[in-house]
Amino acid sequence: MTPPNFLRSCDGGRFQLVVVLAGHYGRPVSRAVKIRGDVVALALLVAAIAVGFGFGIRLYGSKHFPGAPDTFGEWPILGQWAPHIGIGTPLSIMVAIAVVAWGPSLASRLPWRKALLLGYVASVSWIVSLALIDGWQPGIAEQLTSPDEYLKEVPGITDIGVFLRTFSSRILDFQPDSWTTHVSGHPPGATLVFVWLDHLGLSGGGWAGMLCILVGALTAVAVPVAVAALGKPELAKATLPFIVLFPGAVWLGTSADAMFAGVTATGIALLAMRTKLSALAGGLLLGFGAFLSYGLVLIAVVALVVCAVTRSWRTLVLGVLAACAVVAVFAWAGFWWFDGYHLVVERYYQGIANDRPYWYWVWANLACLALVIGPAVAAGLPRARRFSLVVAAIVVILMADISGLSKSEVERIWLPFAVWLVPAAGFLPGTRRWWLVAQAGTALMVNHLLLTNW
């Protein structure tokens, strides 16, 4: 006799597979196999490390990264094995203790706007203190000044019109005037931000790094605001401490992707607010987001879900019109997004992507993501499977993963998507303080063991 099998959810962020077996005397015997999201995430990470090292798949050292020591490579997150401490060590520990001790209670009892403001300040403090573990120069001021980064090209951009009209012609590699890796790998909007910053007199890596941090920390406001606007105010309050102690803060300080995450998260939150002005502003930000990174067009899935859940089709129309206006302005100025996209795909395979096997990174990327979101979010994902924002984020991440255009380095590339998984931690039952400790511990462990590349 073949017994039936079925899947049901249970407490603690687990799935429980109950298999009913026929006993010797016709009485069913129930055996339960509990699957925890955090355990699955840990298993993925261990497997990625074991396969990467065991089969010689991971890239490391000067052979693949010119001038890098053998301790630099894919762990699977990109960085250099270098256990260290710094001035940020006591600062980050103090921030973590404060958020764990008082974050949940303050988020639940303070007026909402004050809670959001406090959350933003705490998020900036957490990001900066983590970056200062490496020191001001390597942690913040020098992150965007390497030969592959945006600031390398800023001094040569004296005419924005010429820059936009000729941008696509310099995307491909192996030509005398090719853009640096990060400039060529993104639409011109990303570089323009740093050009505008330079024109304001705020030149150099310190200003650029702090801009990315301050904008990236807006995720600590935008994500709870969007959750509350979707009719989940209690979940929004539960989410706030977790988005503050987001382990991905390691890469929010400092990478341009932090800015991308802040811009698009704010755009989604504005759409969720459903006023005419906020819809237009949200559409403008999301439209500009597509000119910060090609992959950010996928955030449209999250935007569509927000509009569908709120049944605000006026918001959708206004947002689309505003986003199209951004596309039109760039096209009028001389840059057509689709031309840039096709060229950047070609450029992608001119570089290190050819040495990274798809069969490995299509799942090892998820191991990197596990470190970004932390064990609490991983544990909460099974319980959040009916919450539209989290489901939309999962869909977006899977689309990015399957595309093959995200092989390694997703710990920073997927930051704009990963922040929308954080509300899953709010579904965990009971007291969540130990889960907050686990989140902080993940970030502190990564930042103290590795000199991450961002």
Image (spheres, rainbow, N blue to C red):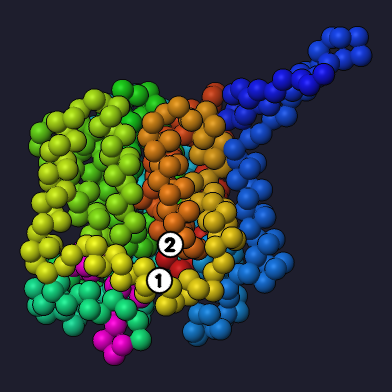
Q: In the structure shown, which secondary structural element does the residue marked by tag 2 occupy? A: loop
Q: Is residue 371 above or below residue 99?
A: below
Instruction: Name the residue that disc number 1 marks.
Output: 348
Highlighted range, magenta: 175-194
Residue at 27% x, 48% y: name it: 264
Q: Are marks 1 and 2 in contact (CB under 8 Å)?
A: yes
Amino acid carrying label 2: it is: Leu
Residue at 54% x, 32% y: name it: 382
Place of residue 201 in the rendered image (x, y in percent of width and height, measured from the top left):
13, 71
Place of residue 249 in the rendered image (x, y in percent of width and height, measured from the top left):
42, 53
Q: In the structure shown, which secondary structural element does the residue marked by tag 1 occupy? A: helix
Q: Is residue 224 above or below residue 76?
A: above
If you read the primary sequence from the N terminus, does the residue marked by circle 1 or circle 2 appear first? Answer: 1
Who is closer to the viewer here, 231 or 342? 342
- Residue 247 seen by the camera: no
Residue 423 among those drawn in magenta: no
Place of residue 104 in the rendered image (x, y in percent of width and height, measured from the top left):
43, 30
Structural crowding at the residue carrying mark 2, measured as other residues with C-alpha within 10 Å and reported as few (<14), some (14–19) or many (≥20): some
Who is closer to the viewer here, 204 or 262? 262
- Mark number displayed over residue 405: 2
Who is closer to the viewer here, 25 or 102? 25
Who is closer to the viewer here, 197 or 321? 321
Residue at 30% x, 60% y: name it: 293
Q: In this rendering, would 265 be left or right of 66?
A: left
